[in-house]
Image (cartoon, rainbow, N blue to C red):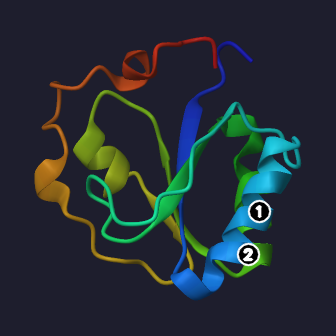
Amino acid sequence: MTGDVPFHAHIYYSDEERSIASALRDDFSAGRPPVLFVGQMTSSGVGPHPIPQYEVHFPESARDDVIAAITASGLRALVHPLTDDDLADHTTLAHWVGRPIELDVTVLDPPGVNQGVARFGKSDF
């Protein structure tokens, strides 16, 4: 997958949607569709995300399949590339699945400060 642009999705859920989110996470963990990393479910907001969420990382080539799986679940998500501009990743470069939520962008690294993909400890997307 080297050379394929890395992407990231934050999948949001309410307490009532937790079982749906968990089932979707299980599908991702089982490789349906294939993703590179499946994060832990949170019980509250974290970072710029004000409500519970988990993240998945995937190559750009899997973007349409990941979005289709999220859309079919009825959950909402923020899908974005992983660049060295955290703010742009979460705003101008982002695509929302479902109704957007307001993020706390004040906690994001300013352009050129974060390490992009390197901050995840791997670059072989």
Labels in figure, total: 2
Q: Nearer the viewer, residue 51 or 43?
A: 43
Which numbered circle lies on residue 24? 1
Which numbered circle lies on residue 5? none
Amino acid type assigned to the residue bearing label 1 in the image: Leu
Report the residue that reaches farthest toward the bottom: 16
Quadrant in the rendering for residue 37? top right
Report the residue that reaches farthest toward the front: 43
Q: Is residue 2 left or right of residue 26?
A: left
From this view, report whether residue 28 is shown above or below residue 83.
Answer: below
Q: Is residue 44 left or right of residue 21?
A: left
Q: Are marks 2 and 1 in contact (CB under 8 Å)?
A: yes
Residue 92 seen in render: no
Q: Nearer the viewer, residue 89 or 10?
A: 10
- The C terminus lies in which quarter of the figure? top right
From this view, report whether residue 80 is shown above or below residue 103.
Answer: above
Image coords of residue 18 (percent x, y): 63, 75
Amino acid type assigned to the residue bearing label 2 in the image: Ile
Image coords of residue 121 (percent x, y): 46, 14
> Circle 1 sits in a helix, a strand or a loop, which is it?
helix
Q: Residue at x 45, y 65 (%)?
A: 43
Q: Residue at x 74, y 18 (%)?
A: 1
Q: Residue at x 79, y 48 (%)?
A: 28
Q: Residues within 10 Å of mark 1 (few under 14, many from 20)?
A: some
Q: Nearer the viewer, residue 2 or 48?
A: 48
Image coords of residue 85 (percent x, y): 27, 35
> Circle 2 sits in a helix, a strand or a loop, which is it?
helix
Image coords of residue 56 (percent x, y): 61, 45
Q: Label 2: which residue? A: 20
